Image: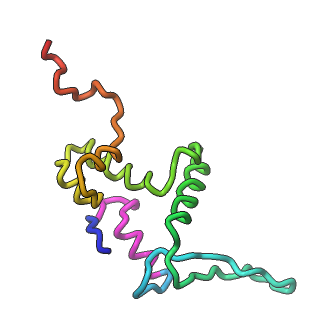
Amino acid sequence: MTVPLPYGRTELCPVRALAAWQDAASITSGPVFRRIWLPRQGRGDVAPPVPRIGRQPITPWAVAAIVKARAAVAGFGGRDFGGHSLKRGALTTGMDRGEHPAKLKRLGRHKSFDVLGEYLEFGDLFEGHPLNGVL
């Protein structure tokens, strides 16, 4: 599946990060996100083992586990995060920036606006309320 992402202006740019990953992992075709593991170190080995990169894609459950683990390291509750947290965050950021809902629906590949609404996180329900200042 092809998902368009624009280049960012900071070191957090996902396009540049993806290109760096593909270069470092020597990925030219096939799944982009793959299992990484350290082989067991032998008793006489002096140097640490070199990470291995598989050929098969990681599973959605692996993505969820990675997100949960990174959230916990960052001090957040791991139970509050999962694989869909990334999608929810991207869509909510777009909403907060005032992007048109149809663009968000297309980005999230949702079939309906009802499903899109389930992904959006509304902070203060009174901020930007359409009836603020009317009465």
Q: Give, as a single range, the part of the protein colored magenta.
A: 7-23
Judged left or right of residue 51, residue 125 is left
> Residue at position x 17%, y 22% from top?
131
> Residue at position x 41%, y 87% from top?
28
Q: Hey, which residue is sitting farthest top in the picture?
A: 135
> Residue at position x 68%, y 77% from top?
38
Front residue of this view, candidates 117 and 55: 117
Position of 89 relative to 19 (above/below): above
Q: Residue 118, image x and y in percent?
A: 34, 45
| The N terminus lies in quadrant | bottom left
Q: Residue 98, image x and y in percent?
A: 20, 43
> Residue at position x 57%, y 76% from top?
35
Query: In the rendered image, which quarter is residue 48 located in?
Result: bottom right
Q: Residue 124, image x and y in percent?
A: 34, 28
Position of 66 relative to 19 (above/below): above
Judged left or right of residue 17, residue 82 is right
Position of 134 relative to 92 (above/below): above
Judged left or right of residue 22, residue 56 is right
